[in-house]
Amino acid sequence: MGHDPPHRPSGHAPPDPHHAHDHHDHSHEHGAGHTHDDVAGHAHDHGHSHSPPASHALGPLGRGEGKGKTLFLDAFSGIAGDMTIAALVDLGVPFAVLENAFEELPLSGYHAHLGHVHRSGIVATTFDVHLDGKQPERTYGWIDRMLGESGLSERTKLLACRIFRKLGEAEANVHKMPLEEVHFHEVGAVDAILDIVGAAAAIEWIGAQVVATPLPMGKGFVNARHGTLPLPAPAVVDCLRGVPTYAVALDAELVTPTGAAIVASVAERFERWPSFAPERVGWGGGQRELPDRPNLLRAVLGAAAPEPANETHVIVEANVDDMTGELAGHAVNALLAAGALDAWATPIVMKKGRPALTLAALGPSERADDLARAVLRETSSIGVRILPIRRIERPRHMAEVSTPYGAIPVKISTGPYGPAVVKPEFDACARAAETHHVTVREVIAAALEAAKTLPSE
């Protein structure tokens, strides 16, 4: 699927291997070199793009039209940078949004254009970049500074830098080298920059919460600039830390480094299909014909579905008047082990002034019997109350921020409920505080300050 293209000789002397390493330029057969019906006849303009008229039946998406909605990336055949852009344009993002973003970059000697391809009767949009001549090889450090100094909108700039950092860190981890020195060869640099900036600009334009499917992992090997690599590629696996994946019996690269970096950076969660009402659909296509599935990425924009009327959770509770504090603590742990999402003991006064505790647990409806058994097993109560309830949750996702005490994971809770709630992971803060001989409060404060630079959802 990958848009990261095969190696093309640059005409430049190779970089000093002691100072820099090349970004993998895999021969990404899955999406690279799309078959376009409109390739012929394009002038090779420097830094220009060519876009056919918008064909979405609902017309183009307006800026922020996805606010409060869900943008679902259905990656049943994997994901790559070019296919992400193609699917979002097909969804309705005006190609001019991407063109304007590209114009803010100090790049030339390329032209980008849209086309279309047929897969299983579906007509999908494609996106491709062609170089008109040789390009210099660029390091991650140069690209990061270039993005930071560009005229991109602040949100697009922050998101593009975040995606590129994930890609750069993955390559740095694979090659055990400093991040600033990771090298992107002539083709890979231009392609990756445009794919990432274009995806960031399109996602900012839509303004929706992004959800994606778990990602399929192909098998086999791929030829890279410095040798043969196993699939999934090492940089892909590094980018997808914490992202759910599954194996498919297909000798193909289904997820590319650029695609992995994009989806891992923008998706708030990963699930097979979200609970929402689809409103419009876009298709992004790749070149390679896959033997068991259409080589497509589906982008779906939809509104949140109404909460189901039926209760989703239960509270199981019992009043106990002969339980010591130690037994209460043990019972709370037993309830958590039985599947409770939370458990607690509350002091109460029963009839005739007897002091007692209410032992309670919150859990999914399907765990009600398990929780009831745990209460009856661990206490002297002869009965329990099961109260059906409905729970509404804030969407949550994890991010990682850089602090003077190292990288700290933070949990970010969003949704249409006011400002996002940001909470650094306490255990990570405690470990960092011990390592750097500072208080946990200082680490938490640094993580919260660093989290202010994350793109707002």
Image (spheres, helix red, strand yellow):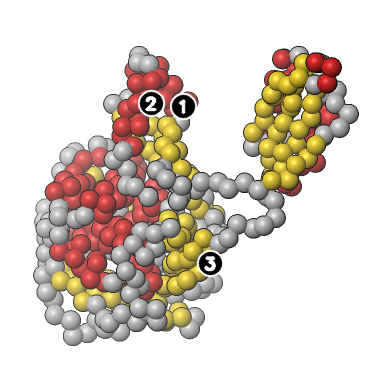
Disc 2: which residue: 444
Amino acid carrying label 2: it is Ile
Residue in the picture at 69% in, 46% down = 389
Q: Secondary structure at mark 1?
A: helix
Within 10 Å of disc 3 (Cα), the crowding (few <14, some 14-19, many 20+) is: some
Disc 1: which residue: 426
Q: Secondary structure at mark 2?
A: helix
Give the x, y percent position of residue 395.
49, 48
- Which is more toward the observer, 69 or 224? 69
Disc 3: which residue: 277
Residue in the picture at 31% in, 34% down = 450
Mark toward the start of the polypeptide (2 vs 3) = 3
Is 408 left or right of 369, judged from the image as shown? Answer: left
CA separation, marks 1 and 2? 8 Å
Mark toward the start of the polypeptide (1 vs 3) = 3
Marks 3 and 2: in contact by CB < 8 Å? no
Is 277 left or right of 127, judged from the image as shown? Answer: right
Amino acid carrying label 1: it is Phe
For residue 128, say whether it is visible.
Answer: yes
Is 287 left or right of 314, judged from the image as shown? Answer: left
Picture layout, residue 309 above or below residue 38: above
Residue in the picture at 31% in, 58% down = 204
Give the x, y percent position of residue 131.
17, 68
Tell me which corner region of the image, top left, top right, bottom left or bottom right, holds residue 47: bottom left
Amino acid carrying label 3: it is Ala
The N terminus: image quadrant: bottom left
Marks 2 and 1: in contact by CB < 8 Å? yes
CA separation, marks 2 and 3? 38 Å
For residue 116, say whether it is visible.
Answer: no
Residue in the picture at 19% in, 63% down = 102
Q: Secondary structure at mark 3?
A: strand
Within 10 Å of disc 1 (Cα), the crowding (few <14, some 14-19, many 20+) is: some
